[in-house]
Image: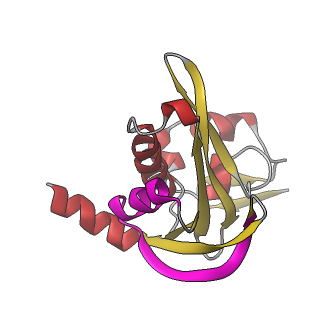
Amino acid sequence: MIITANELSLIQHADPDASVEEILQDPEILEKLSESRSFQGPMPSNICFRIENNEGTIGQICIKSIRWINRKAGISLFIKRDMQGKGYGMSSLQAIIEYGFMRLNLFRLEAEVIDGNKASLKLMQQSGFTEEGRQRKAKFVNGVYKDLIIFGLLKEEYLLSLKQDK
């Protein structure tokens, strides 16, 4: 089908179309479109990244349980035990926060930390997350039920922290 509008022709095509896809290679065009154009296939519910340094893979960080309409997601992170305490968790978390808010246009990020995990609690607090609540005895670890501490970070809080850092 063809629709004409003044000197234009609107030509129906199957999606994807090679000539349209060529235009979408321009990042300035792509960033103004729906997030569904950023992904091949259906919108993902999880996006995971392997964390590597010069020694190889040292961990993983994920944006998970993405709720595209509500623009929120959870974050999970782990680093090999012998690589912990070297700043890799902080660097990875800061990068994924920026990616989530600035590239995926999420509004809210959430994280759960097992009560007693002092390093992860400190990481969340230093990264600007706010403790929002607690799920009592929600995680079974080594034969014991432990509380999960729930953290949240809003895009507006993240943007404000960037301004304050300047």
Which residue corresponds to the image point at 74% horizontal and 54% vertical from the top-left? 44
- Say which quadrant the N terminus sits in: bottom right
Looking at the image, which residue is at 31% across and 65% down? 159
Q: Position of residue 97 (x, y in %)?
A: 45, 55
Measured as percent of width and height from the top left, residue 128 is found at 35, 65
- The correct choice, above or below, for 27 with respect to 112 in the image is above
Residue 122: quarter of image = bottom left
Q: Nearer the viewer, residue 166 or 59?
A: 59
| Residue extending farthest left | 166
Find out whether residue 121 is within the magenta segment: yes
Residue visible at 74% across and 43% down in the picture: 40
Number of on-image labels: 0
Q: Is residue 41 magenta?
A: no
Q: Is residue 152 above or below residue 135?
A: above
Locate residue 99 relative to residue 1 in the image: left or right: left
User: In this image, 153 relative to 128: left or right?
Assistant: right
Residue that extends furthest to the top in the rendered view of this protein: 54
Where residue 132 appears, x then y in whole percent?
49, 81
Quadrant of residue 85 within the rendered picture: top left
First to last magenta residue range:
117-140
Relative to 133, say whether 106 is above or below. Answer: above
State the image coordinates of residue 46 (x, y, percent, origin top left): 71, 53
Q: Is residue 75 left or right of residue 47?
A: left
* Quadrant housing the C terminus: bottom left
Colour scheme of the picture? secondary structure
